[in-house]
Amino acid sequence: MRRFAATALILLLAACAGSSVVQEPWRGTADGWTAVNAGVRPVGLGLPGGVRLAPGVRFAGGLEILAPRGDRMHGLSDLKLAGDDVVAVTDAGDLVRARILLDRRGRLAGLTGLRLRGLTGEDGRAFPTKSDGDAESLAITADGDLIVGFEQRPRLWSYGPLDRITPRPSARAAPPVPPGNEGLEALASGPDGLRAAGEGGGVWDCVVARCVEVAAPPETSPAGSDWRVTGLDRDRAGDGWFVVERLYREPFDMRARLRRMDASGRPGPVLVSLSLPSTTDNFEGVAAVEGASGTRLYIVSDDNDNPRQRTLILAFDVDAPAAGADGDPVRPFR
């Protein structure tokens, strides 16, 4: 029964995918970077019924990244924007970068110049195990420095300027989250430092030498089937944040949602909800970009190198000054 359900899910999601497009390969020569031979194809929101958008929120395009089984392009766990480039980390300790392509309407249309490099430890060497390199979050500071958060062994490391990554990162203060899958999961740069969140709960504001608790973790850890915070970025149009959350219930109930978080760490209105039979997956990262008429949000999914899942990047536009305020109805996608 589970095999049938999983097969049906694959067929359902693939039915709404566009044809594959070979992305223009990266031809640079920067040290440490390797061109990625991966395909990209457009995806939509799939069948109606599983997507709900708050007033003032619009779908702005989607992509699936296609890579062979076992390729290092699987396992994307967070993303942020640096100019026109998307920067992502993987849970195997790799850094990914590509240029975002938009169509004439400004919708997400493709990626070009995909490239990848391995992150390193404080000794300048490759991580000895996958758990050592379990990068689940990243932030790019106002000065352009790359900060990476690791989950299995919670720590925050600075790799220096994004365009001149150092092989010997420097340690920063990290939140007091437990090791393992309840650990450090979400990270973003703010006006006064970093904001971090644990998958098991809790929110902290961090500077180089210390972290201050903003919202305490729950006394009881959330169950595996509960909503969990997996990504975070700053709302540059205000003093709040955008959060992506996911929920998984066996055998194949995978859901995701985008919502606001206020400055005190309190969860706010839900902007986007994704579930079957529409497009959904294991979304773990979010990036926010302020525009003339609002904010563009990008979310990325971690496919766990599992043929039953996909590596997706979806884009949503949120009108200024706010969408989905308390009491506003959420409309289904049609």
Image (tube, rainbow, N blue to C red):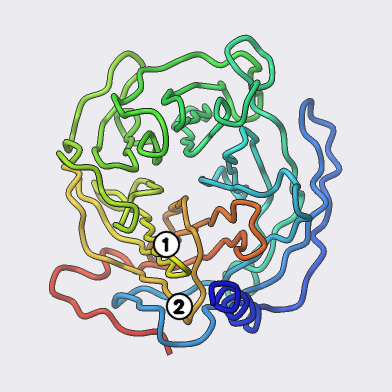
Q: Position of residue 7 (x, y in %)?
A: 63, 76
Category of crowding for the residue at label 1, using alpha-carbon neighbours closer than 10 angstroms: few (below 14), some (14–19), many (at least 20): few
With 162 as the anchor, is 280 left or right in this view?
left
Q: Is there CB contact under 8 Å for labels 1 and 2? A: no
Q: What amino acid is found at the position of numbered circle 2 in the picture? A: Leu
Q: In this view, does 97 lie above or below 40?
A: above
Q: What element carries label 2?
A: loop
The C terminus sits in image quarter: bottom left
Residue under the image location 64 percent in, 18 percent down: 166
The N terminus sits in image quarter: bottom right
**Residue at numbered disc 1:** 292
Q: In this view, does 263 lie above or below 51?
A: above
Residue under the image location 59 percent in, 56 percent down: 303
Q: In this view, does 3 lie above or below 79?
A: below
Of badges 1 and 2, nearer the viewer stands 2
Residue 153 found in image quarter: top left
Q: Where is residue 266 in the image (x, y as percent from the top left)?
A: 17, 49
Q: What amino acid is found at the position of numbered circle 1 in the picture? A: Ala
Of callouts 1 and 2, which one flags the residue occurring earlier in the amino acid sequence? 2
Residue under the image location 37 percent in, 67 percent down: 318
Category of crowding for the residue at label 2, using alpha-carbon neighbours closer than 10 angstroms: few (below 14), some (14–19), many (at least 20): many
Q: Which mark is residue 46?
A: none
Residue 255 found in image quarter: bottom left
**Residue at numbered disc 2:** 276
Observer-nearest of 136 and 18:
136
Q: Position of residue 231 (x, y in %)?
A: 40, 48
Q: What element carries label 1?
A: loop
Q: Position of residue 157 (x, y in %)?
A: 49, 21
